Image (spheres, rainbow, N blue to C red):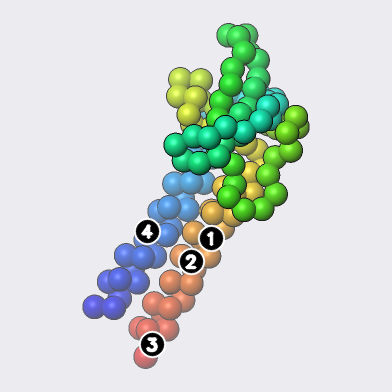
Amino acid sequence: MDYVFFIAGTLLMFYMGLRSTLFRLRLMRQGQRVEARVAGTVQSRQGTAYLLEFATAGGSHRLQYPAPRKGKGLPMGSQVVLYYDPDHPEKLYVQGDKAVLGAEVVYYVLTAALIVLSVLLAVQ
């Protein structure tokens, strides 16, 4: 019975990592790539968010991007590479965001750890 929980946990961690990776890669491949300026921070439903400003042929835009709760954030006034879906502007990714990349690594490391634990339990 313990195996069921390890297998379910392993599949869940792998799914979460894969979903995040595929979302990010899809935005980078199919989304619009723009240079955006970090104009400041605002309070959103999810907490503090960066206000990113950029211009396209369709006009100027301002999008919110979640700020990390810990660690070094984006300096105000800096330029970042932003990928977003023009049809769904809430779907966006700032290139090199260590919080997103770190979360993906954590998911895959947990997947590997659960596989190792499952094997160790099976051997006993």
- Lower sequence index among marks 3 and 4: 4
Percent of width and height locating residue 44: 49, 34
Q: On the image, numbered disc 1 is attached to which residue?
A: 106
| Three-letter code, disc 3 | Val
Q: On the image, numbered disc 3 is attached to which residue?
A: 123
Near mark 3 (Cα within 10 A), the count class, few <14, some 14-19 or many ≥20, is: few
- Lower sequence index among marks 3 and 2: 2
Gap in angstroms between the C-alphas marked 1 and 2: 6 Å
Please tell me which residue is depicted at 66% across the width and 53% down the height of the picture.
Answer: 71
In the image, farthest residue toward the front: 43
Q: Which mark is residue 12?
A: 4
Near mark 4 (Cα within 10 A), the count class, few <14, some 14-19 or many ≥20, is: some
Q: Nearer the viewer, mark 3 or mark 2?
A: 2
> Foreground: 21 or 60?
60
Near mark 2 (Cα within 10 A), the count class, few <14, some 14-19 or many ≥20, is: some
Please tell me which residue is depicted at 58% across the width and 50% down the height of the picture.
Answer: 69
Q: On the image, numbered disc 2 is attached to which residue?
A: 110
| Three-letter code, disc 1 | Val
Gap in angstroms between the C-alphas marked 3 and 4: 23 Å
Residues under numbered marks 4 and 2 in contact, where contact means CB atoms less than 8 Å apart: no
Percent of width and height locating residue 30: 53, 27
Residues under numbered marks 1 and 3 in contact, where contact means CB atoms less than 8 Å apart: no
